Image: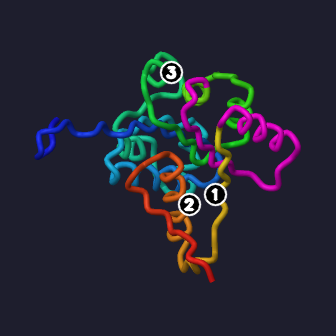
């Protein structure tokens, strides 16, 4: 596709999104909505526990969430495009990321498509962002987060910032997602910058 000036249009950023069974399904849903608004091509993997949590927290089923993505892949489809490093992607984010998934990524377990795609992202030196959800952390959680960080991943617990004085839960979610979009390299992200006191 060419632009009005005749130059080729820049390629759409291709982002892999994972949703697991940790609490905070709203982060994955809002991320998909914003990536669509930003013109990104999205590849989604939702684990069975992720589907349960989407239903419990948001009243959504697999079909309605997969409709938010350009491409949806089954967790067991290890032959999908995103299982190979030859399929170029810009970044991957798992939102929310359970401790089970974190452990699988930290140890390169690749036991399903989601963790295989994360392993591919790391081995290809692409950006991987994990919105880990658990509290308090035990030593195994901390060691797994350290391992992922040492491999180049970004551990991003979705901790709310209150200095902008948010007045709704949605404002807190949106603030986190805009920061994640910036980390993913999405040009049209607009995280709120601290302006000083």
Expressed as whole percent of the image width and height from the top left, the position of residue 13 reads 38, 39
Examine the rendered structure and indicate whether residue 2 appears above or below residue 197: above
Q: Residue at x 51, y 21 (%)?
A: 83
Q: Residue at x 30, y 36 (%)?
A: 11
* 166 displayed left or right of 4: right
Estimate the spatial distance between the alpha carbons at disc 2 and disc 1, rounded to whole Å.
Answer: 6 Å
Crowding at mark 3 (Cα within 10 Å: few <14, some 14-19, many 20+): many
Disc 3 designates what residue? 83
Residue at the far right in the pictured view: 139
Sequence-wise, the earlier of marks 2 and 1 is 1
Crowding at mark 2 (Cα within 10 Å: few <14, some 14-19, many 20+): many
Expressed as whole percent of the image width and height from the top left, the position of residue 184 reads 50, 45
Contact check, label 2 and label 1, Cβ < 8 Å: yes
Disc 2 designates what residue? 176
**Quadrant of the image for the C terminus?**
bottom right
Secondary structure of residue under mark 2:
helix
Secondary structure of residue under mark 3:
helix
Residue at the far bottom in the pictured view: 197
Disc 1 designates what residue? 158
Secondary structure of residue under mark 1:
loop
Viewer-proximal residue among 144 and 184: 184
């Amino acid at each position: 596709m060419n632009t009005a000036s005749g130059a080729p249009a820049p390629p759409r950023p291709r982002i892999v999104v994972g949703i697991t069974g940790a609490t905070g399904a709203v982060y994955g849903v809002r991320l998909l909505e914003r990536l669509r608004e930003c013109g990104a091509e999205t590849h989604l993997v939702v684990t069975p526990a992720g589907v349960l949590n989407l239903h419990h927290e948001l009243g959504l089923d697999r079909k309605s969430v997969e409709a938010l993505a350009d491409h949806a892949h089954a967790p067991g489809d290890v032959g999908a495009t995103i299982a190979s490093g030859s399929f170029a992607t810009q970044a991957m984010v798992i939102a929310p990321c359970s401790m089970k998934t974190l452990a699988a990524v930290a140890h390169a377990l690749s036991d399903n498509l989601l963790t295989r795609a994360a392993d591919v992202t790391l081995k290809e030196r692409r950006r991987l962002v994990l919105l880990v959800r658990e509290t308090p952390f035990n030593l195994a959680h901390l060691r797994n987060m350290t391992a992922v960080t040492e491999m180049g991943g970004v551990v991003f617990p979705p901790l709310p910032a209150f200095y902008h004085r948010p007045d709704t839960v949605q404002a807190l979610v949106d603030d986190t997602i805009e920061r994640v979009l910036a980390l993913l390299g999405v040009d049209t992200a607009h995280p709120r910058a601290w302006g000083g006191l």
